[in-house]
Image: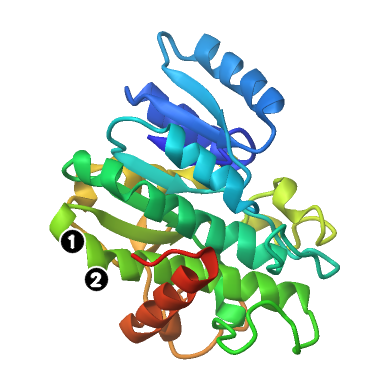
Amino acid sequence: MIVSGGASGIGIETTSALAAAGAAVVIAARRTDAAEEVAAELRMKIANANIQVRQLDLSDLRSVASFVDDWEGPVHALINNAGIMALPDLRRSSQGWEMQFATNFLGHFALTLGLRRSLAMAQGARVVCLSSSGSLFGPVLWDDPHFQFIPYDPLLAYAQSKTACTLLSVAITDRWGDDGIVSNALNPGAIATNLQRYTGALRTPEHLRKTPEEGAATSVLLAASPLVEGISGRYFEDCMESPIVPSRPQLRLEGVAAYALDSTNAQRLWDMALEQVGERK
């Protein structure tokens, strides 16, 4: 199994739980030195844990291509966990994309696409896409996803990137079912991690917050549990499928917007992403 960002935040707990259950886990991380330290600690904690580290910078297609080219063998689960949130200023990737869309979605899209053959080899692979309740703040900005004309807004940029992550699961379901590949998206909940470094810390009321272990639980369920065998194209939170909500809740952010599960939107996003990452598959 591969966990992007598996050496920080809920990624550590996801890696730990999967390894403890017997999976061989590869942590895909931008900073391999820090990831190696985490992996070493987890190996000591979990007897005979098979945890490796490989370099991956999701904001750079060259790094994604290198990761894919070096991979051999099947992938039974790909957990697209890494992400960034609410960058205060407009930043662009080496390809010129808005950084949140580049890291949270396009990098994971290129990674997933590049690993399709390895996922198919597993004969029952699962792709887990981490979204967020932030997706309730906006859909994909089809005509200007990289803020060339629209004034940059940190939360709006984050929202569209996480909506795109959910639509990726829908598109995989529509396209790769014959390969035995399923995919679901999830909202891990409000967890105090480095993800909130630009938001002035976690602002969710304390009684609604989760621990990192609780936040990782839905990822682990979707990656490994027989309870969701064959289920695909859905959105989960608190280890349960989420309801579709007609508008953004004003109190507790929960549920999923219809635009994030729409097959037409998923097809449109797939085509747009193919064009942007330079693929013709």
Residue 222 shows in this picture:
yes
Q: Residue at image x 54%, y 83%?
A: 139
Q: Residue at image x 66%, y 19%?
A: 37
Circle 1 — which element? helix
Image side of residue 257 versus residue 152, left or right: left
Circle 2 — which element? helix
Q: Is residue 107 above or below residue 160?
A: above
- Quarter in which the C terminus is drawn: bottom left
Residue marked by disc 2: 174
Q: Amino acid at mark 2?
A: Asp
Q: Give the number of the disc on residue 236.
A: none
Q: Quadrant of residue 73?
A: top left
Q: Residue at image x 44%, y 44%?
A: 217
Relative depth, front residue between 248 and 75 = 75
Image side of residue 50 versus residue 147, left or right: left
Q: Amino acid at mark 1?
A: Gly
Residue marked by disc 1: 177
Distance Cα–Cα, label 2 vs label 1: 7 Å
Q: Position of residue 189 (x, y in %)?
A: 55, 57
Q: Position of residue 95 (x, y in %)?
A: 67, 62
Q: Position of residue 271 (x, y in %)?
A: 41, 76
Q: Quadrant of residue 41?
A: top right
Kindly check if marks 2 and 1 are in contact, taking CB atoms under 8 A apart as contact.
Answer: yes
Other-residue count near label 2 (Cα within 10 Å), few / some / many at <14 / 14–19 / ≥20: some
Relative depth, front residue between 31 and 254 = 31
